[in-house]
Amino acid sequence: MNSQAPNPETIAVNIAEVRTRISAAARAAGRDPAAITLVAVGKTHGAAYIEAALGAGQRVFGENRVQEALGKFPPLKSAHGDLVLHLIGPLQTNKADEAVALFDVIETLDRPKLARVLAKVMAKTGRRPECFIQVNTGEEPQKAGVMPREADDFIAFARDELGLPVTGLMCIPPQDEEAALHFTLLAGMAERNRLLKLSMGMSADYEAAIRFGATHVRVGTAIFGDREPR
C-alpha cells in the first residue's frame, strides 16, 4: 500500500477537475450533474489519501479488497458519519460477513452462491447494503461478472427470490474494445429490469459512460495518482 504522504492540495484540485468534467459531460448529455455520483477509488493508497479527499469534500469511496478496506476505513467511517463505501472488487464468500458489516454498497454481486451467502448474512445481521450486479459485458474469461445472456435470470433470482436489495448494475469493459458498446448493453439491461443505478466508467472513460447513462463513475488514478505496486 502507498505509504507516501499525499499532497492534500493536489488531491483537492484533482477532485475539483473531475467534478467539473462530470458536470460538463452531464450537461452535454442533457442530464443533471447531481444525478452522477463520483466514487473515489483509493485502492493501494493509504488512509492519509482518503483523509485528504475527505478534506476536499469527497464522501463516496470505492475499494477493491475487503482486507485493505478493513485496514483503513473503520476509523474514517466513525469520524465521518456521511462517508459511503463501495466494494468494487471481487467478493469471496468467506469475506461476506466482513463486507456486509463494512460496505454500504456491494457492486460485485455476480453468482448464485454469493447471492445466497449475502442473503443469509443480511438476514442474520439486519444490515442491508445495496447490491449492484456485475455483468461481464465482454464475456472475458479472466473477469468476474455474470454473462449478459444470464443476467436477467440472475437479477430476478437475487432480487425477487432471495430479496436482496439489488438497485443497479456494474461493468468493466474490455480495454481493447469500444467502451460505448458495453455501456449501451448495460444501460439497456438496467432499463429492461427496472434498475435505476449504473456503475460504469473509470478514469479513462467516465465522460463517455455519463453520456450513456452512468449514475456512478469510479475514478482513482485521476484523483489519487498512479497506484503503488502491491
Image (tube, rainbow, N blue to C red):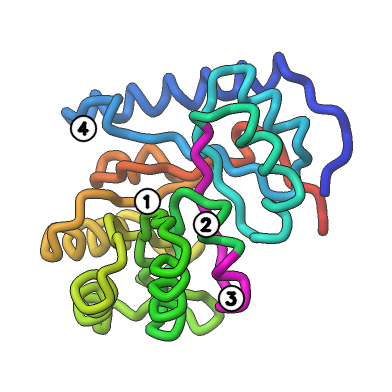
Residue at 26% over, 61% down = 186
Callout 2: SS: loop
Part of the protein shown in magenta: 83-97
- The residue at which mark 3 appears reads as 92
Question: Which quadrant of the figure has residue 153?
Answer: bottom left
Disc number lying in front (1 or 3): 3
Among the two numbered marks 2 and 1 on one chain, the one whose residue lies closer to the N terminus:
2
Residue 26 lies left or right of residue 141; in this view the side is left
Q: Amino acid at mark 2?
A: Ile
Within-10-Å neighbours for mark 1: few <14, some 14–19, many 20+: many
Question: Which quadrant of the figure has residue 215?
Answer: top left
Among the two numbered marks 4 and 3 on one chain, the one whose residue lies closer to the N terminus:
4
Circle 2/circle 1 CB separation < 8 Å: yes
Disc number lying in front (2 or 3): 3
Q: CA distance from mark 2 to mark 3?
A: 12 Å
Residue at 31% over, 54% down = 180
Does residue 136 sit above or below 219 in this rendering? below
Among the two numbered marks 4 and 1 on one chain, the one whose residue lies closer to the N terminus:
4
Q: CA distance from mark 2 to mark 1?
A: 10 Å
Callout 4: SS: loop
- The residue at which mark 1 appears reads as 199
Residue 105 lies left or right of residue 219; in this view the side is left
Residue 148 lies left or right of residue 107; in this view the side is left
Q: Amino acid at mark 3?
A: Gln
- Whether the magenta-drawn stretch holds residue 90 is answered as yes
- The residue at which mark 2 appears reads as 88
Within-10-Å neighbours for mark 3: few <14, some 14–19, many 20+: few
Circle 4/circle 1 CB separation < 8 Å: no
Horizontal and vertical percent position of residue 72: 73, 44
Circle 2/circle 3 CB separation < 8 Å: no
- The residue at which mark 4 appears reads as 29
Callout 3: SS: loop
